[in-house]
């Protein structure tokens, strides 16, 4: 065996090992989770303490390595107000601990009814995401599935860094 | 016999410099001394051993040995003067390394290559792990559940209040909020909820309440309430809130 062949073999083995690690990583980060969460948004007006109620449905779609979140806002009567789309990728997925770190890079708010005021939650989430995307180019969001029910159709989500929670219908989870 | 650039013809007692093609006819004593040294390369030979010339008894004097060494060095010339090394009070040594057999050379080369390849693979693995450590290594995930307790309501129903971690909340705030929630549940004739998850947002401006329970026909019920209060001292649950957002349903 000549030296060249031996070197070629050593490089091939190194490349093969590297490819294997990268492939394992890519496969480990691929997820298929679809969640839908209905929330009642209650806000007290600072001066009058009058209660303002809205409905927000958050749809989380984590497919392979891409992540998409749609926050759909409705009035208490069910009138659509706005939809906030946030999209990006999955930075890492730790399936055993049910932790998914999202790198969200795009945010878009679509108003459906200009007559109805935007819920505070929408303003808050959009401002936070836009500020992070403008400043750092990315808005990081960590989702941890704290608990699922025995039928695996309900999941309690814990969000970081906001430390908010939400019980969601678990539509798909592979 | 090959001694570096010299060829020693034992049978004819001739020393040939293969570079210059010069020949030196050795005396019997010189040839015997050189033969002894050449037969024991890199070994220290005493004057006494050399004087025996391989036999049991000395065939020459030690001074004859010293003279032969002197002459041989002269034949080797300046560049190869150290071919015969003097070790004071010990003797002489022929500085000549015998080349290892071909299979040994191949084995040594292969070993070198294996070590080199292993080092390369190790460096590649370390580089890869360094570049991708954030994807490969995860800190041990802690459960975000901070505390939970089972509360018995006035109607003897039991609910579990579970607080999730929020870095800024104080135990006083937790206690006040729990009291308000228990009071609100005590106003209900029947409570459908079994597990009540509570969490403040990191900025302490949102109170999250997620409730899970079952209807009378065993259907799973879920309710999420996110209450925002952007005032300096957020109250979250006011009498007005309790009226508008009933926790009973």
Image (spheres, coloured by chain):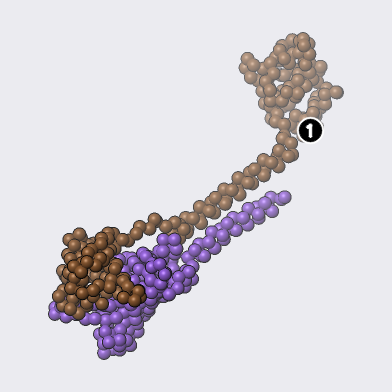
Q: Which residue is painted at 78% across and 13% down in the image?
A: B55
Local SS, label 1: loop
Q: Nearer the viewer, residue B95 or B120?
A: B120
Is residue A65 visible in the rendered image? The answer is no
Q: Nearer the viewer, residue A127 or B88?
A: A127
Measured from the top left, where is residue A173 in percent x and y? 45, 70
Residue topped by disc 1:
B18
Q: Which residue is painted at 44% across and 61% down in the image?
A: A96
Residue B202 falls left or right of residue A6: left
For disc 1, the chain is B
Is residue A84 visible in the rendered image? The answer is yes
User: Badge 1, how many Cα within 10 Å: few under 14, some, many 20+?
Assistant: few
Measured from the top left, where is residue B96 in percent x and y? 70, 29
Q: Would you place residue B102 above or below residue B161 in this image? A: above
Q: Would you place residue A71 above or below residue B3 in this image? A: below
Q: Would you place residue B130 above or below residue B30 in this image? A: below
- The quadrant holding residue B108 is top right
- The quadrant holding residue A149 is bottom left
Measured from the top left, where is residue B205 in percent x and y? 23, 70
Measured from the top left, where is residue B6 in percent x and y? 77, 30
Q: Would you place residue A1 above or below residue B232 in this image? A: above
Q: Which chain is assigned purple?
A: A
Q: Residue furthest right?
A: B12
In the figure, the shade used to draw chain B is brown
Q: Which residue is painted at 28% across and 59% down in the image?
A: B146
Q: Which residue is painted at 65% across and 54% down in the image?
A: A9
């Amino acid at each position: 065996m000549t030296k060249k062949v031996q070197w070629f073999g050593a490089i091939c083995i190194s490349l093969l090992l590297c490819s294997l690690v990268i492939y394992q990583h890519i496969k480990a980060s691929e997820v298929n989770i679809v969640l839908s969460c209905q929330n009642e948004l209650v806000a007290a007006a600072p001066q009058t303490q009058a209660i303002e109620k809205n409905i927000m449905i958050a749809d989380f779609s984590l497919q392979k390595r891409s992540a998409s979140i749609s926050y759909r806002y409705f009035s208490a009567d069910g009138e659509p107000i706005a939809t906030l789309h946030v999209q990006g990728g999955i930075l890492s997925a730790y399936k055993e601990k049910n932790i998914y770190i999202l790198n969200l890079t795009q945010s878009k708010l679509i108003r459906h009814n200009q007559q109805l005021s935007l819920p505070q939650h929408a303003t808050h989430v959009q401002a936070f995401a836009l500020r992070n995307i403008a400043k750092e180019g990315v808005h990081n969001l960590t989702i941890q599935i704290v608990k699922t029910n025995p039928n695996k159709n309900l999941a309690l989500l814990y969000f970081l860094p906001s430390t908010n929670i939400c019980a969601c219908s678990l539509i798909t989870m592979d | 016999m090959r001694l570096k650039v010299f060829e020693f013809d034992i049978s004819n007692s001739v020393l040939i410099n293969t570079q210059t093609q010069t020949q030196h006819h050795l005396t019997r004593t010189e040839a015997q001394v050189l033969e002894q040294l050449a037969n024991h390369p890199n070994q220290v030979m005493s004057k006494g051993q050399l004087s025996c010339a391989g036999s049991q008894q000395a065939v020459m004097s030690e001074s004859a040995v010293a003279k032969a060494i002197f002459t041989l060095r002269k034949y080797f010339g300046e560049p190869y003067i150290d071919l015969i090394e003097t070790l004071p009070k010990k003797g002489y040594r022929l500085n000549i390394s015998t080349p290892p057999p071909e299979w040994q050379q191949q084995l040594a080369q292969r070993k070198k290559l294996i070590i080199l390849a292993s080092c390369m693979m190790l460096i590649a693995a370390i580089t890869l792990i360094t570049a991708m450590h954030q994807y490969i290594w995860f800190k041990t995930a802690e459960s975000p559940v901070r505390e939970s307790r089972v509360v018995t309501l006035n109607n003897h129903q039991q609910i579990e209040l579970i607080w999730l971690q929020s870095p800024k909340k104080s135990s006083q705030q937790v206690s006040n909020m729990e009291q308000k929630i228990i009071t609100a549940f005590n106003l209900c004739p029947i409570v459908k909820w079994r597990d009540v998850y509570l969490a403040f947002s990191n900025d302490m401006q949102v109170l999250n309440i997620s409730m899970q329970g079952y209807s009378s026909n065993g259907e799973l019920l879920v309710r999420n309430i996110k209450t925002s209060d952007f005032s300096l001292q957020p109250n979250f649950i006011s009498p007005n809130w309790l009226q508008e957002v009933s926790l009973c349903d």
